[in-house]
Amino acid sequence: MATDTETDTDAFDEISLTNQVVLLGVAELQRRDETPAQTHVLRRVCRTQLEGVNVGVIGTLTEADVMRSLYRLEDEGFVEEIETEGTSPTGKGRPAYALNVAPEIVEEGVADELLESTD
């Protein structure tokens, strides 16, 4: 799917608004050169992004929501999991994610209401 996603923004119609928000979060972090990023960082970025748009259908994003979205986005070829050196407090690995498509493609493909600022 990744190669199709690079040129076909119709692929974004297949993913939910929540997944699109998470994808925008990964794209933002990629622009800042802060990827691969872990779920807690992505959640913070996504919540900040949601404050600036008028999308009532998306409630509060939990870390579990972000994780589920990342799994789906990875399956669809939009992001990829990157193994990191660190471990969590419970001793498990801390997966991190990076964008698998250009940030510009993400902006072109996601729903317009996610990009329209309420400011």
Image: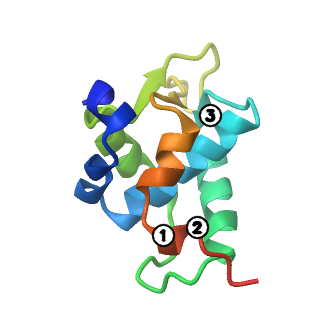
Residue type at tag 1: Asp
> What's the CA distance linking mark 2 and mark 1?
5 Å
Say what secondary structure mark 2 lies in: loop
Residue pictured at 67% horizontal, 56% vertical:
44
Residue pictured at 52% horizontal, 31% vertical:
97
State the residue position of label 3: 37
Q: At which x and y percent is residue 74?
A: 34, 34
- Tag nearer the camera, 1 or 3: 1
Disc on the earlier residue, 1 or 3: 3
Which quadrant of the figure contains the N terminus? top left
Say what secondary structure mark 1 lies in: helix
State the residue position of label 1: 112
Say what secondary structure mark 3 lies in: strand
> What's the CA distance linking mark 3 and mark 2?
21 Å
State the residue position of label 2: 115
Residue type at tag 3: Ala
Residue type at tag 2: Leu
Q: At which x and y percent is residue 15?
A: 29, 56
Q: At which x and y percent is residue 16?
A: 31, 62
Q: Is residue 86 left or right of residue 113?
A: right
> What's the CA distance linking mark 1 and mark 3?
25 Å
